Image (cartoon, helix red, strand yellow):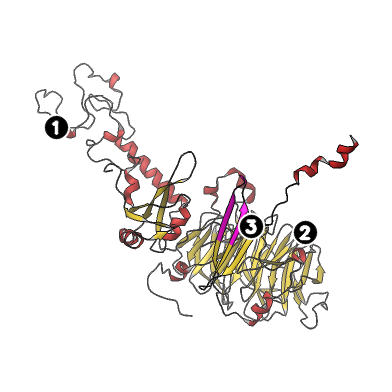
């Protein structure tokens, strides 16, 4: 027992047996002024990893007031006393990018939003008979079941085609446009003049294709939305970026869609970016095909 | 535009101010601390420790040498901006609600609250700028008690011996601080408490914000209302953008009602209004509570907002802001 005790001083020491090699770091500045830091480390799986970082520093010069320059040299005080210069992460962080644009006319205020909502509601109630009770037989303001002419009149159609009630041999009015047949249920989308022209808000997709969208393929697995946004924002305003990802792993599948606000800018983006190198890969950029045509 | 978030406070912000060159930003809050920040990168220069109550107000002189602060611990303090040391302390029977330097930095006006049987008072102190600033007069140079509604905010006018005040009732008035006489007033400037008063650089006009959901631009000469900006939330702060014809408004519903309303309804945004056309031109989101105070850098390149959430957000305008001409090609000549 005494023997083993001298060999093993403490079980806690066991863990620290393998000395970690200090990571090798190469650091040099190449002829273009780009600083390259190469680091070799061992990852969790015991594999050796080479990390190459390239940083380019650009010096931004600005002319400031003498007093301002002097104030930058002031030593910190109070709670910050003794802290090194530069922003401290604990107190200073950078927020999310904000889109801020100034334009005339202002944004709709809450009251306006509300009034718009009301307007839509009013339209709906009007299209559905103004919310009033209308008899389908004689158009009086009572329920059809309580109509005094219940037995003598045929059912009028809701669209209100003014066919005289007793003219049974009248030609079928307006043909297909009067989609309503008696009291049969008609989905709201089909009401008021056949399903030829669908109003907004009926298709979940359709609308998405309003913006000119380009399809970017052959991008690397770890390309993020923000990377593409940064890349394409050189050309113009990017409205939306979608990166195709594997559902399980979350890794990129090598394609993305980028929507612009303007079609000419989208075309410009195709012209400029198609065939360009990005992340060691050559981008393939073209117009995105609508879902049906693919 | 990417805001810089400053987390130097644990409680609601009460006032923020830029210095004259716009490189330093001072913030005070209800948590007894005053912070000084570099506006270009958000680095904290230091803290001014010493107050033992909520700090309601602060102001910095044009040379960035002295800072004054007023607190609910009933003191008014003079600080050295560079070292963070408290140079002098005045004590009153009630809390200090508003302080302001004059244009030549040799006077400070302060408003103390009307409470516990004490009348609200306006005091003007002469600041001795010689030496290290610790030799100050104990007694105010001038003092008077405004009659009627209590004063909430104040600033020096461009006319000698005159100060402009905003009141609890919504009144805006001009006082002669030597005599304590009310020279001029506009009883119906606002319908509710005046929450903020900020002077234009030349002090010929100023903006007030009020709980009555409106902000107004007044002429200092005769208190004529030049412009009105009507919103749908109570306003806590209003600032004049420099170099561009915009007005910045901040507000939101009362802090006590925040938890019962959604973020969307809260309207915790900084709103940009066109100074001339009295029309809203843009909004900046970000705060999780009402915006308590807004300050625009005198350089016109950035602005900061302090919220009930304890954050200060510094926004450096990007190129789109300077290029934007929402009302077409024209410019205002100074």
Measured Cα–Cα span from mark 2 to mark 3: 19 Å
Residue A171 % position (x, y): 9, 28
Q: Is residue B179 visible?
A: no
SS type, badge 3 = loop
Side of A28 where A188 appears, left or right: left
Residue B77 % position (x, y): 78, 69
Residue B311 is tagged as: 3
Residue A271 or residue B207, whichever sits in front: A271
Q: Is residue A114 magenta?
A: no
Identify the residue under disc 2. Answer: B53
Residue A29 versus residue A180 in the image, above or below: below
Name which quarter of the figure residue A82 lies in.
bottom right
SS type, badge 1 = helix
Q: Which residue is most to the right?
A: A2
Q: Which residues are magenta?
A: A38-52
Identify the residue at image location x=64%, y=57%. Answer: B311
Residue A192 is tagged as: none
Identify the residue at image location x=25%, y=25%. Answer: A136
Callout 3: chain: B
Measured Cα–Cα span from mark 3 to mark 1: 66 Å
Residue A75 or residue A8, whichever sits in front: A8
Side of B197 where B74 appears, left or right: right
**Cβ atoms at labels 3 and 1 below 8 Å apart:** no
Residue A214 or residue B68, whichever sits in front: A214
Identify the residue under disc 1. Answer: A175
Mark 2 or 3: in front is 3
Callout 2: chain: B
Do circles 2 and 3 both sit on a common chain?
Answer: yes
Q: Is residue A40 magenta?
A: yes
Do circles 2 and 1 both sit on a common chain?
Answer: no
Callout 1: chain: A
């Amino acid at each position: 027992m005494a023997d083993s005790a001298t060999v093993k001083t403490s079980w806690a020491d066991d863990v620290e047996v393998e000395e970690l090699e200090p990571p090798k770091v190469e650091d040099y500045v190449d002829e273009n002024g780009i600083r390259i830091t190469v680091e070799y480390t061992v990852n969790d799986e015991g594999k050796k990893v080479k990390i190459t970082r390239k940083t380019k520093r650009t010096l931004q010069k600005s002319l400031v007031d003498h007093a301002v320059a002097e104030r930058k040299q002031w030593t910190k005080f109070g709670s910050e006393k003794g802290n090194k210069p530069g922003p401290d992460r604990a107190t200073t962080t950078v927020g999310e990018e904000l889109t801020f644009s100034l334009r005339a006319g202002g944004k709709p205020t809450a009251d306006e939003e509300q009034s718009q909502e009301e307007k839509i509601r009013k339209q709906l109630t009007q299209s559905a008979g103004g919310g009033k009770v209308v008899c389908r037989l004689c158009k009086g303001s009572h329920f059809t079941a309580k109509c005094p002419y219940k037995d003598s009149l045929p059912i009028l159609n809701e669209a209100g085609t003014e066919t005289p009630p007793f003219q049974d041999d009248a030609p079928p009015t307006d043909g297909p446009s009067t989609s309503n047949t008696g009291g049969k249920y008609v989905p709201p989308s089909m009401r008021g003049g056949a399903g030829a022209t669908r109003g907004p808000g009926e298709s979940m997709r359709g609308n998405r294709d309003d913006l000119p969208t380009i399809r970017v393929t052959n991008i690397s697995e770890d390309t993020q939305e923000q990377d593409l946004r940064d890349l394409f924002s050189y050309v113009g305003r990017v409205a939306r970026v979608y990166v195709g990802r594997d559902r399980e792993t979350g890794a990129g599948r090598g394609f993305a869609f980028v929507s612009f606000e303007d079609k000419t800018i989208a075309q410009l983006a195709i012209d400029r970016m198609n065939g360009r190198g990005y992340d060691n890969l050559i981008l393939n950029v073209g117009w995105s095909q609508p879902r049906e045509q693919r | 535009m990417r805001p810089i978030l400053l987390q130097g406070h644990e409680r609601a912000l009460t006032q923020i101010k830029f210095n004259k060159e716009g490189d330093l930003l001072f913030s005070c809050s209800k948590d007894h601390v005053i912070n000084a920040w570099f506006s270009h990168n958000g680095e904290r220069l230091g803290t001014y420790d010493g107050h033992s109550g909520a700090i309601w107000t602060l102001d910095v002189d044009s040379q960035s040498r002295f800072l004054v602060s007023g607190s609910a611990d009933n003191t008014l303090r003079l600080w050295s901006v560079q070292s963070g040391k408290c140079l002098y302390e005045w004590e009153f029977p009630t809390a200090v609600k508003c302080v302001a330097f004059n244009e030549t930095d040799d006077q400070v006006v302060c408003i103390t609250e009307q409470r516990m049987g004490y009348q609200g008072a306006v005091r003007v102190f002469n600041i001795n700028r010689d030496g290290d600033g610790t030799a100050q007069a104990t007694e105010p140079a001038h003092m008077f008690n405004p009659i009627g509604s209590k004063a909430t905010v104040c600033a020096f006018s461009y006319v000698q011996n005159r100060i402009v005040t905003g009141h609890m009732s919504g009144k805006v008035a001009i006082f002669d601080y030597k005599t304590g006489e009310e020279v001029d007033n506009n009883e119906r400037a606002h319908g509710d408490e005046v929450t903020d008063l900020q002077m234009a650089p030349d002090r010929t006009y100023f903006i007030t914000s009020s709980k009555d959901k409106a902000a107004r631009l007044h002429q200092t000469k005769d208190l004529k209302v030049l412009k009105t900006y009507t919103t749908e939330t109570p306003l806590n702060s209003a600032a004049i953008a420099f170099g561009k014809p915009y007005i910045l408004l901040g507000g939101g519903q009362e802090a006590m009602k925040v938890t019962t309303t959604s973020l969307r309804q809260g309207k915790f945004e900084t709103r940009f209004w066109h100074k001339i056309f009295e029309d809203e031109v843009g909004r900046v989101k970000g705060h999780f509570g009402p915006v308590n105070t807004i300050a625009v850098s005198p350089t016109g390149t950035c602005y900061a907002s302090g919220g009930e959430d304890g954050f200060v957000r510094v926004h450096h305008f990007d190129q789109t802001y300077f290029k934007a001409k929402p009302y077409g090609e024209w410019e205002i000549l100074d």
